[in-house]
Amino acid sequence: MIARDGPELQGAELHDRLARTWSRKPGLIGWLSTVDHKEVGRRYAVTAFIFFALAGVLALIMRTQLATPESGLISADRYNQIFTMHGSTMMFLFAVPVMDAIAIYLIPLMVGARTIAFPRLHAFSYYMYLGGGLMLWIAFALNIGPDIGWFAYTPLSGPEYDPGKRADMWAQMITFTEVAALALSASIIGTIFKLRAPGMRLDRMPLFAWAMLVVSFMVIFAMPAIALASAFLISDRLVGTQFFNPAEGGDPILWQHMFWFFGHPEVYIIFLPATGFVSQITETFSGRSIFGYPFMVLALVATGLLAFGLWVHHMFATGLPRLGYAFYTAASMTVAIPSGIQIFCWIATMWSGRPRFAVPMLYVVGFIITFVIGGLSGVMVASVPLDLQMHDTYFVVAHFHYVLIGGAVFPLLGVVTYWFPKITGRMMSERLGRWGFGLLFAAFNLTFMPMHWTGLMGMPRRVYTYPAGMGWDVLNLVSTIGAFGIAVAVILFLVNVFTSYWKGEPAGPNPWGGTSLEWATTSPPPPYNFAHVPVVESRTPLWDVDGGPLPVMTGLQVDERETLMTTLIDAEPDVLEASAEPSIWPLVAAIVTAILFVGSVFTPWAIVWGSIPVAIALIAWFWPKKALEPGEEPVSA
Amino acid sequence: MILGLALLSGCDREAREVRGKPLPETAVAAQTSTLFPGGGSAGPEDPRAEMYAENAYHISEGGRLYRQMNCVGCHANGGGGMGPALMDDQWRYGGRMDQIVASIDQGRPNGMPSWRGKLTPTQMWQLAAYVRTLSANVPKDAAPSRNDTMSNIYPRTLAEPEPPSASDPAGAKGPAR
Amino acid sequence: MSKATQAGMGGGLLLLTGCAGVQSIAPSGGAHTAAFNNLFVIFLVVCGFFYLLVIGFLGAAILRRRREGDTGVPMLFRAWVALVSVSLVGLAFASWLTDRAMASYSEQGSPVRVRLTANQWWWDVTYFGASHSEDIRTANELHLPVGRPALIELKSNDVIHSFWVPNLAGKQDLIPGRTGDIALLPRKSGVFRGQCAEFCGAQHAHMALTVIVEPEAQFRAWSRRQLATARTPTTAQQLAGMAYVTTRECATCHAIAGTSASASVGPDLTHVASRSTIAAGTLPMGRGGLYAWIADPQGVKPGAHMPYIGLEARELDAVVAYLESLK
C-alpha cells in the first residue's frame, strides 16, 4: 500500500509522515550526510560570511598600512600576500559562494519544489568549497599564502619568479572552487528546469530564479577557461611544461586571455544574483509585480551573453591591435544598456507601486545610488584612452568596489534582512538595521569616493607603501577612516543577526507580504518544504489568492522522497522521481578529492594514486539502489 | 588536520629571508679547505647549509645568480661543457653544501674562478643551494620545475620537419622499404 | 546627493586647471593633453547627466504623490533605452576618435630613440646614438628634449611591468619575450614621475622612473656628459672607494665606464650621482641616501636584488665618497 498526500492524508498526520521521510538522521554522521538544501545552504552562507569577515580584516590591515606614507607596519612580502588573499577570498570564497548559498536555500522554495535537484551533488559542492577555503587560509597562516595578486599574471606566478608553493596554493584553491561552483550550477539548473511547481511557466518564474539560471550557465561556460588556465599554471610549476614561458614558445599573454575570459564573466556571476535580490525586494516592498518583466529577463540574458565578449578591456595596455580595442570598447559599453534597463524597471516599479521603506528596501535605494556611480565609472574605463591612464590605479579600485560592494554586497545585506525571517523564523531588528545601513552607506562612500581622486592623482594599485608629498596622504587617511567605519557597520549587522536569531520577534510565514512561493510555507520551512505541491497560475501566486490557501496538487508518496518533475517550458506535470537519500559518501568523496588536489600541489603522482580512492568513493556514492515502484500520474485535488 | 600537517612540513621552505642567514659564532665559514684527497673525512657540516639547502626563496635567488654570473657559460644548465656537469652525482670537490660553497669561494683548478669578494657569502650559499637542485637532491616543493629561459635542448616539436625524400613522393617516412 | 557629479567636477577641475602633481593623470606635458582632457570632460558630463537623471527619477519615484492609474512610464521606457543607447554610441565614437588622434602626431625633428628594459625592480635605459659607441646607458631616469618625439622600445628581463608616466601618456606594458613600443612627444619642460603600473613582485611599490623634459640644448649637454667616461677620483678616499667598487662585489653586477667594472646585471653607475634618486625612486640621491642604501639595501628595499655586503665603516665611507663623485 503506497501512501500519498491527498484528501485522505493531510494535516498533522501528513506532516509527521513527511517529516519522518525527509528528515536526516540525528547525530554527527547524520549531520555530515545531510542532503537538505536548506541545511547545506545555511552552512554555505555561514562559511561564506566567515571568509567575508576574514578578508575584511585583511582589508583593514591594508588600509592601516596605507593610512600614512612610508609606513612600516607590514613588510612588502606580507602586504603582497594580504592583498592577494583579500582579492582571492572575496571573489572566490565569498562573493560567488554566498550568492550560490542563498540560491540553493531559496531556489527550491521559490519554484515550489520539495528539494533541490542532485541533492548529494550540492552537498559535495559544499565540502569541496570548504576544503578549498581551508587549504588557502591554512597555507596563508603558514606563510605559504599566494603573493601574486588574485589575477596571478604569468610569469610572476610561474616557477622562476614565485618560488615555493605559494602560487600553487592559489591555483589549487581555484580548482576546489571551480568544482564546487560547477556542481552547484548543475543542481540549480536542474532545479529550475525540472522541479518547478506545476503551472510555473518560464515566464512566470521569479526574477531571482531567472538570474540564477543565467548565472549557472555562465559558470558552466566561464569556469572551464580558468580550470584550464590554472591546470596549465600548475603543470608549468610542477612538471616544467612551457605554456607561459616565452623563451620556449609559450606566451604569458595567453594566461591573461584565459584568466579574463573567466574573470570578467565572474563579475557578472556576482552581480546578476544581486539584481535578482533587488527585483525580489523591490517587488515585495512596492506592492506590485516588477515593471517590464520580459525586459528584465532579456536584460539578464543579454548581460550573460555580453559578459563573454569584453575580457580584453582588462588588457588594453598589453599592446594588442588597436582596431580590436575599439571592438572591446564598444562591447564593454553595450553592457551598460541592459543595466540601464534594469535600473529603469526597478525605479519604475517603485514609481507605480506604493513603496514601503523597510531595511531591505533601504539597501535597494543604497544599491541604486552607489551602483550607478560604479557603472558610470565603468563606462569611463571602457574607453581606451581613458583606461590607459586609469588602468591599475586607485580609480579602478574605486570603480569595482562601487560595483561589487554597492552592486552586490548592499543587495546581499538587504536580502539577508529580507529572507532572515524565512530562514530563522524571527525578524531582524528594524532599528539596528537602519543604523547599520546608514553607517555602512556613509562609511562606504567615505572609503571609496576619495579613491577616485587618489587614482586620478596617479597612485597605482597594489603598492605596499607610497612616498610622501605626492598629494595622496590625506585622501588615503580618509579612506582608512572610512574602512574602519565599514567594519563597525558590518559588526552592527552581525550583532543584529545574532541578537535577532535568539531574541527576534517571531515571524509568520509571510511577514513582508511577499508574493513568491517561499512565503507560502512556514518560517523556517519544514524539511519537505511544502506539504502539497503548490500550483501556480501567474507571476504573483500569493497576491492572487490574497491570503487564502494556494491551489495545490496532491498524489506524491509520503514515505519515499518523491518529487514532481515538470516540463521544461510550461511546467506541466511530467514524471515522479525519487530524490536521493542522505548519504555520507559525498563527504567521503570530497575528502579524498581534496587529498588528491592538495597532494598534486606537491607531486604529480598524487593524481595517479589519489584517483583510486576517489573512484571508490564515487562508486559507493552512485551504487544503484533497489528499483522503486513506478510512480503513477499525480491526482489533482 | 591532515591538510594542516601536510602543509606544516613545507613551512621552512617558504621563508624569505632577504638578508640571508646570520653567521653563527662558531661557524668557520667557507675558508677552511674541505678537500680530502687522501680519503680523510669531512668535518661536521656548516649549520647554515640546511637553512639554505631546502629553502625555495634561496634556491630561486641562486638560480638567478647562476644565470647572471654566467655559470651557464661553462656548466650549461647543469649538463656541463667546459666545466664539469652539475646534474650528475659525481663531485670532484665534494657535493655537500659547504663543499660547493668552498668551490665557489676558493675557485678550483682548470678554470673555476674564485668568487671570494665578488659575491657575498649569502649569495654563495644561495648558488650552492641552487646547484644542488640540479642533481635532484632537493625536495620538489622547494626546487623550481623550470626557469623562464631557453633550455639547452631545442624542443622537437618546434624543429623544422625533414623534407620528404625524392624517392618517396607521398612524403611518408615509413621503416625500410 | 550626487557624489559622482561632485567627484566628476572635482576631477574635471583638477585636470582643467592643470594643478597636477608630478604623477597625475593630466597629460599636461604630453602631446595629447587637449584630446585627453576633452574626452575626459565629455565622459564626465555625459555620465554626470545620466547620474542626475537616475537619481532624479529615483527621488521622484520615492517622493511623488500617488494617484491611481499611471500610464506615462512605458513611453518613457523607450525614450530611456534610446537615450542610453545613443549616448553610449556617442561616447564609444568619441573614444575611438580620440584614440585615433592619439595614435598619430605630426613629426617634428628626428626622434630620440630609447630602449627601456624593465627589471625587478628598476629601469634600464639605453639611448641609441648615431653609432654603437655613442649609446648611452643609464638607469631609472629618462631625459627627453621638449618638442621632439621620443620612440621608446619596451622590453622586460623578467616579469610583466608597465611603463606609465601619467603626465606624458597612458600605460604600455613591458612583456618578457616581446618588444613593445610607445611614442612620446613632450610639449612642456618639467620633471615628471613615472611608476611601474603592473604588479611585478615584492618591490612593485619601489619602481619609479624620473622623467626630465628639458630644452634641446640642455638635453644635448646632458647627453654629452653621459657619453663621457666616469670621472677620475681626486682624493685618496675616493681612490680607495674606486678600488673597492671596481674590484669587489660591486663590480660583479654594475658597470662604470672607463674602469674595469663592466657587468650589466645591475644599473650602470658611470654617472650615478647625476641622477636624482637611488634604487628606482626609493631614496633621494645624496650622501645620506647612498649611505643608507649601500650599508643595508635589504633594509631599505627588502627583496631587491642588491645584496647586503656588510662593508666596514672605512670601506663604506670610501665607496660613498667615490660614488658621490660620479656626477
Image: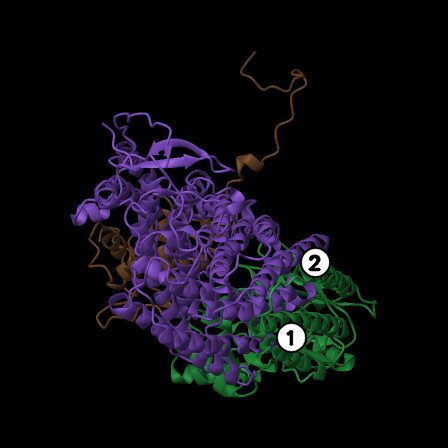
Element type at mark 2: helix
Q: Give percent across and percent down for residue A496.
A: 32, 71
Q: Residue at x 53, y 52 (%)?
A: A265
Image quadrant in which you'd find residue B18:
bottom left
Element type at mark 1: loop
- The quadrant of the picture occupied by the C terminus of chain A is top left
In this view, the residue in front, C152 or C309, is: C152
Numbered mark located on residue C25 in the image: 1
- Rendered hue of chain C is green
Q: Residue at x 27, y 65 (%)?
A: A501
For disc 2, the marked residue is: C78
Q: Chain of mark 2?
A: C
Q: Give percent across and percent down for residue A244.
A: 52, 48
Q: Amino acid at mark 2?
A: Arg
Q: Is residue B22 left or right of residue B108?
A: left
Q: Give percent across and percent down for residue A615.
A: 30, 33
